């Protein structure tokens, strides 16, 4: 592993790691924290820690190491903020992305296009649940009540839809 | 610091792992029971596959949110008023499925769209106020002004290809009338334009400088010129198809 001295990762290697993993790390942190600002803070803390002590990690497992550090930072931030996951449930996922590179922006646009196509191909009843849950940010129980359906039916529709969207996103079809 | 477990799980999310994806989705949307969420977070401590599943579900959810919003941006009908009725979020009507001006949108989406609209208008007016003398708005080239509004919308809403999340400004549920904003010279200028130039696209069709307001029955009303601006922004947004399929010139 390239080191600037015997203690720290050199800046070029750190920049390369950031380029490679920051986007996915940011999404992971957003999933844990459900707060764009906190996720950004945790991401910065993670890479600060990487520069300080990243040389202790094995290069072949560096990605896992980064994610683990990020998770610890997220939990620490959550404790300091005095909120738990349940208190941070309502979030527009497609919020501003700080530090997003042009390549990442292009990839995100392509991702949206693929998901849009996949949404259009979903059966209407599945698309309806997806839109109510993700776009309308209604809880599954509320959706079930509004549609007059058993909760299990709503969950099944959403699960099927998520699986199809995920497969589309992964280019499996 | 890395464990063997990290190495074991340092693999991309397997395509067939639908159960994990579903678990991750319910986790990020807060749909897990407290005990389930705690159990999943214990797993996140050491399971790289689970961590990547969380990241993947956030990516999917964000993309679906943007895609769903895009489906609801309507085509503009010149000379008519448009209503954004607060309807159930399950509306499946895309912009091409109806020629009526009614805009079906979810409650959360309406909040986002309304806040973004208001923000776009504020930006647009600040541009006008900075670049034009207040009294000159009626003499301003209408095409250029439309473009400014469209650009402002694009910069505000689709920055970096994403819908920017902004809190709804109506904390006291007052009508979303732009002229309620205090001491805004640009707004005053637009009101002057309203009185002076009936052909101005900002004010044609009985419109005014008011961007959006609530009708007596609680529906959100949006003025024509704002819809024109929104439509122009859709042309500018790289990932959004033009619902009209024309009007490319600004």
Image (cartoon, rainbow, N blue to C red):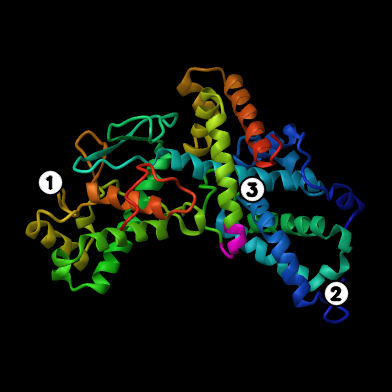
Task: Give the answer, above or below, for where A56 lies relative to A140.
Answer: below
Give the chain letter at badge 1.
Answer: B
Say if mark 1 contacts mark 3, CB within 8 Å.
no
Give the spatial CA distance, label 1 vs label 3: 47 Å
For mark 3, give the secondary structure.
Answer: helix
Task: Give the answer, above or below, for where A169 lies relative to A51.
Answer: above
The image shows residue B21 at horizontal and vertical percentages of 70, 37
Q: In this rendered view, identify the residue nearer to me: B149 or A41.
A: B149
- Report the residue marked by disc 1: B206
Label 2 neighbour load within 10 Å: few <14, some 14-19, many 20+: some
User: Which span of residues is magenta-colored?
Assistant: A98-105
Q: Are marks 2 and 3 on the same chain?
A: yes
- Report the residue marked by disc 2: A2
Q: Is residue B178 left or right of residue A142?
A: left
Question: Magenta span has A103?
Answer: yes
Q: Is residue B26 left or right of residue B110?
A: right
Task: Give the answer, above or below, for where B245 lies relative to B91.
Answer: below
The image shows residue B49 at horizontal and vertical percentages of 79, 45
Q: In this rendered view, identify the residue nearer to me: A169 or B177.
A: A169
Give the spatial CA distance, label 2 vs label 1: 68 Å
């Amino acid at each position: 592993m390239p080191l600037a001295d015997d203690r720290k990762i050199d800046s070029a290697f750190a920049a390369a790691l950031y380029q490679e993993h920051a986007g996915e790390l940011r999404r992971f942190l957003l999933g844990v924290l459900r707060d764009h600002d906190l996720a950004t803070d945790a991401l910065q803390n993670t890479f600060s820690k990487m520069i300080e002590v990243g040389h202790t990690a094995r290069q072949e497992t560096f990605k896992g190491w980064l994610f683990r550090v990020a998770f610890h930072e997220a939990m620490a931030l959550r404790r300091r903020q005095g909120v738990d996951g349940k208190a941070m449930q309502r979030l527009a996922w497609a919020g501003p992305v700080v530090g997003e590179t042009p390549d990442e922006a292009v990839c995100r646009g392509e991702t949206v296009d693929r998901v849009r196509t996949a949404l259009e191909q979903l059966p209407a009843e599945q698309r309806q649940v997806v839109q109510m849950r993700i776009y309308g940010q209604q809880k599954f129980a509320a959706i079930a009540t509004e549609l007059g359906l058993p909760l299990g039916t709503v969950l099944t529709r959403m699960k099927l839809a998520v699986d199809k969207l995920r497969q589309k996103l992964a280019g499996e079809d | 610091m890395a464990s063997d477990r990290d190495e074991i799980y340092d693999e991309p999310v397997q395509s067939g792992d639908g159960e994990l994806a579903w678990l991750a989705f319910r986790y990020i949307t807060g749909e897990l029971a407290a005990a389930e969420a705690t159990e999943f977070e214990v797993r996140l401590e050491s399971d790289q596959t689970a961590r990547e599943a969380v990241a993947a579900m956030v990516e999917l959810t964000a993309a679906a949110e943007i895609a769903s919003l895009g489906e609801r941006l309507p085509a503009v009908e010149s000379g008519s008023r448009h209503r954004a009725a607060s309807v159930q979020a399950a509306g499946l009507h895309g912009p091409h499925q109806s020629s009526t001006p009614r805009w079906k949108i979810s409650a959360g989406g309406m909040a986002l769209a309304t806040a973004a609209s208001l923000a776009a208008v504020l930006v647009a007016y600040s541009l006008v106020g900075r670049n034009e003398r207040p009294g000159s708005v009626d003499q301003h080239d209408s095409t250029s002004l439309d473009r400014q509004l469209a650009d402002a919308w694009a910069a505000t809403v689709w920055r970096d290809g994403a819908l920017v999340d902004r809190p709804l400004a109506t904390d006291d549920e007052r009508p979303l009338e732009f002229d309620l904003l205090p001491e805004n010279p640009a707004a005053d200028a637009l009101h002057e334009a309203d009185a002076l130039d009936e052909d101005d696209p900002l004010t044609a069709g009985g419109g005014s400088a008011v961007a959006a307001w609530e009708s007596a029955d609680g529906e959100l009303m949006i003025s024509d010129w704002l819809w024109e601006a929104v439509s122009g922004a859709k042309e500018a947004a790289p990932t959004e198809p033009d619902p009209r399929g024309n009007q490319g010139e600004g």
